[in-house]
């Protein structure tokens, strides 16, 4: 990528929703020495299945071998590598910022500009949340750092392929199967 940040592979791994699946999948990456940049897992529209979204650094991870190894795990149903240009990515951030009462309005305004939410207000700090693209969260986090971040948590990316125009039309009309 041109902005100096590493490019990433995004894998969407559909697995059977069983105990230990996440440990087996993440263990496979650890055994191969691949660093996971972010990992998110949750049940899908089918409660018997979960989707694991794994983001790894392109430079350190030739994925062909790891994909072959993932398919050998009995609980893995489907693996998709998502191209960031043809996928929709989102992430959630919650941050507590130490800010004196007289500057609190600036953080509230900044949060509103980024379309975030104020979750809690204390005497010396404010907790905010923001969801959006990873780049949007990076920009917001950088601006919050100027105030003094006390705690920050990001979920990691979740992603799905973008719909083509025909599929979007069917979904909008309620005809998707």
Image: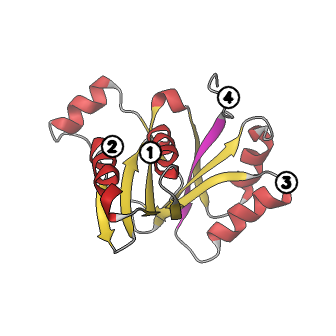
Q: Position of residue 70 (x, y in %)?
A: 71, 53
Quick one: label 4, few (<14), some, or many (20+) residues within 10 Å? few
**What residue appears at the point 37 percent right and 52 percent down from the top-left corner?**
130
Residue 136 seen: yes
Cα distance in 3D space between marks 3 and 2: 37 Å
Give whichever of 152, 68 is nearer the camera: 152
Mark 3: secondary structure: loop
Residue 11 percent coordinates (x, y): 60, 45
Neighbourhood count class around disc 2 (C-alpha, 10 Å): few under 14, some 14–19, many 20 upward? some
**Figure quadrant of residue 18:** bottom right
CB atoms at circles 2 and 1 under 8 Å apart? Answer: yes
Query: Are the residues at dot 1 and dot 3 in contact (C-beta closer than 8 Å)?
Result: no
Question: Reading the chain from its start, which is encountered first: label 4 or label 1?
Answer: 4
Residue under label 1, please give it.
140
> Mark number for residue 4?
4
Q: Mark 3 sits on what residue?
A: 33
Badge 2 or badge 1: first in the primary sequence:
2
Q: Nearer the N terminus, badge 2 or badge 4? A: 4
Residue range highlighted in magenta? 8-16
Nearest to N terminus: mark 1 or mark 3 = 3
- Spatial CA distance of label 2 from label 1 is 7 Å
Q: Is residue 45 visible?
A: no
Colour scheme of the picture: secondary structure
């Amino acid at each position: 990528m041109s902005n100096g940040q590493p490019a990433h592979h995004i894998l969407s791994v559909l697995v059977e929703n069983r105990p230990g699946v996440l440990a087996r999948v993440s263990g496979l990456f650890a055994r191969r020495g691949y660093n996971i940049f972010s990992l998110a897992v949750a049940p899908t529209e089918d409660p018997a299945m979960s989707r694991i979204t794994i983001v790894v650094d392109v430079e350190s991870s030739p994925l062909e071998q790891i994909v072959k190894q993932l398919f050998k795990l009995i609980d893995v149903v489907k693996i998709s590598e998502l191209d960031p240009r043809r996928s929709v990515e989102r992430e959630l951030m919650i941050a507590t910022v130490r800010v004196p009462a007289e500057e609190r309005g600036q953080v509230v305004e900044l949060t509103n500009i980024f379309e975030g939410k104020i979750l809690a207000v204390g005497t010396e700090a404010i907790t905010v949340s923001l969801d959006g693209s990873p780049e949007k969260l990076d920009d917001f986090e950088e601006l919050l750092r100027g105030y003094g971040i006390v705690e920050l948590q990001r979920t990691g990316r979740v992603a799905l392929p973008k719909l083509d125009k025909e599929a979007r039309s069917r979904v909008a009309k309620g005809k998707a199967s």
